[in-house]
Amino acid sequence: MTAQKQSDMSTHFLERSHPFDLLFRNLFDTETQFVPAIEAKQQHPIDIFEDDLGLTFEVACTGISKEAIEIKLEGDLISFNYDKKKSPDVQNRNYIHQGVAKRSFQLGYKVGTKYQLSKAKASFRDGLLIVSVPFAEESKPKVLKIN
């Protein structure tokens, strides 16, 4: 093989996105900051969607009682809070195995004026907190008649 063909092959090898290649390059990258897994902040599972009725928040709350969850409505802000340390159902337990993550969470969202946050309704079903926010009256589509 010529020197040109060898350099093309090595370049091709480095551009390939094989997991071991990526691991090897990142291992010696001094600019990358590694965060221990115990310190990593994980995003809490939530779905937010709009349908014909308005805006819906679905917050996963597996193993958490509905009394331990706090929902705050302040102006155009909605927040969902759960503090694991304050929850009476997880204190004084000697776990042998803990597979259900009941992490504390604080989620906050700004809700647009097209929704009427003051008329939000919450329900809790199958470990899922569901908060429905209806459309504001002014934001519903209107049909104009032509005179």
Image: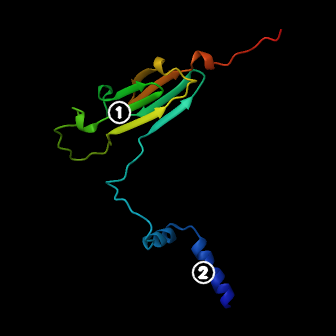
Residue 14 appears in view: yes
* Picture coordinates of residue 144, whole percent (x, y): 76, 13
The C terminus - image quarter: top right
* Viewer-proximal residue among 55 and 76: 76
Q: CA distance from mark 1 to mark 2?
A: 52 Å
Residue 79 sits above or below residue 115 on the image? below
Label 2 SS: helix
Label 1 SS: strand
Question: 66 left or right of 95?
Answer: right
Residue 10 numbered tag: 2
Q: Amino acid at mark 1?
A: Asn
**Disc 2 residue crowd, few under 14, some 14–19, many 20+, Cα 10 Å:** few
* Picture coordinates of residue 26, whole percent (x, y): 46, 69
Residue 1 appears in view: no
Residue at the disc numbered 1: 81
Discs 1/2, front: 1
When asked about the image quadrant of residue 11, the answer is bottom right
Q: Amino acid at mark 2?
A: Ser
